[in-house]
Amino acid sequence: MNKVMLLYPPGQLLQRSEDRAQCNISESATGSVHACNDLGYCAAVLLEKGYEVFLRDYQTERASFADVVNDVRTFGPDMIALSTTNTSVLDDIAFLNRICSFHPCVCVVKGAVFYDIDPQLLSLLDLSNVSCLIGCEMEFVIGALADRYLRQEGSLSEINGIFYKQDGGFVKNAFVCGLNDLDALPFPARQLMNNALYVRPDTGEPMATIQTGLGCPSACIYCLTPIISGRNVRKRDLENVYREIAQCYDRFGIRNFFFKADTFTIDEEYAAAVCDRIIRSPLYGKIEFTVNSRVKPLSMALLKKLKQAGCFTIAVGFESGSDETLKKIRKGTTVQDNLRAAKMIKEAGIPLFGFFMLGFPWETKEMISETERVIRQIDPDFIELHVAMPYYGTGLYEECAAYGVLNDSGFGHDYYSPNTTGTAYLSHEEVEALKKKILLRFYLRPAYIAKKMMGAVRRPRIMGSYVRYGVRLVKKNLFGS
């Protein structure tokens, strides 16, 4: 009773390691799958405890259910742990039920969808073969769960952030977020991960995810981060981060990185220290990385240091071009803040990836037009445009309910298919039509295409990536496939 199987099931591409965003890559025009660090961390913890571990990301490998069946029969797991999303939870539980029909075992499911959820909503799911649901940080509880289920050690009642089956129903433990020490974790077990699957979008080279911190003090009403990871920003020790980067480079030949934090630049002193550690290391000039950022706080001094250290893209959540919307979603920024941050990023010479949202319950067509105008003013290198998705437990969920636009529980929905009827003034179909027009008008500008082609002409690999993403964008927004 010592075999644990960690997996992402076959199906559409989803950002399963991202509890905050859970992006549907299959529906995205520009997104790419990040490494399965949640599984990698769990594998490392279990290996340290002496468990035999099998890890596979079937979705990103484009593997089939037959591949899963073969692996289950060959490995013979005593426990299966699966990472789910709001989009896929119904399919993922059905997948586990199929597995258990020929290989009964302990089944554990992790996902932000289970964070402190109303037990009545759980009754909508067929959990007949599921022993435990994890709604907090999986890597900090997986060892205790394996010990209890497979070695009969410890007590389930003492494990934070879970629902566990007892007497035919589920018992809900306390959900306390933001307390775990990130430095206490071993590095993700990349020797078990297929690192070639996770690539830098423009070059296609392998890209590792380095978790530098968790938590966000902001109060954005659409975001799960403060709920799941807490408002206290937990940062890893600088040397601990650097040792993981060096391991990726030396052992796995990876030179591109995503420095994952709920907002990497929220603590400018720490972000600058990460850059300084790279600059004074033997890896300086040999690695590149991407980060996410808010528009505030953000200084030119930090941007220049990021550029010097090897930052090849900054992703920024601008969200809206309407001051009214920015205020209502409690972003803590204004349109002028957005424009100022974009101007600084461009002056620093770092490519800009802008994230925007539309379809908030109070939005009119005119407010969405304001967002398009600001997108044109900012003129990012790339954009992603999401329709507001009211995840259970967020303020946006409550707002959508108050406006009468909430459609159902939210299971099976995401930014590309939200559980709303639209806004108070626009139908869902009208919001989707506006989104498609904005994306196509942005990306199909002759000046934009010419600029990107000129920038990529000396690097054929990047040229190929631009063409692939361009074809994908047009197919998704003109033909819906």
Image (tube, helix red, strand yellow):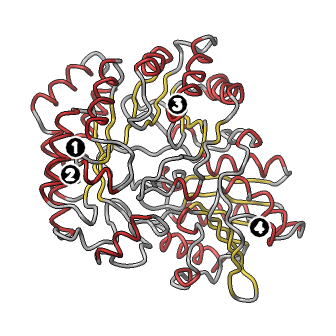
Q: Quadrant of residue 373?
A: top left
Chain-order first, disc 3 or disc 1: 3
Chain-order first, disc 2 or disc 4: 4
Q: Is residue 149 left or right of residue 331?
A: right
Amino acid bearing label 4? Asp
Question: Can you say whether 117 is above or below 265 in the image?
Answer: below
Q: Residue at x 29, y 29 (%)?
A: 340
Determine the CA span between mark 4 and mark 3.
34 Å
Q: Which mark is residue 471?
A: 1
In depth, the one of 72 and 231 nearer the eye is: 231
Mark 1 residue element: helix
Amino acid bearing label 3? Phe
Q: Which residue is mark 4?
A: 78
Neighbours of disc 2 within 10 Å: few (<14), some (14-19), many (20+): few
Q: Which mark is residue 475?
A: 2
Amino acid bearing label 2? Lys
**Marks 4,1: beta carbons within 8 A:** no
Taking the image as drawn, is residue 87 in sight? Answer: no
Determine the CA span between mark 3 and mark 1.
26 Å
Neighbours of disc 3 within 10 Å: few (<14), some (14-19), many (20+): many
Neighbours of disc 1 within 10 Å: few (<14), some (14-19), many (20+): few
Question: Can you say whether 217 is above or below 151 in the image?
Answer: above
Q: Residue at x 34, y 71 (%)?
A: 400
Foreground disc of the pair 4, 3: 3
Q: Which mark is residue 257?
A: 3
**Marks 2,4: beta carbons within 8 A:** no
Mark 2 residue element: helix
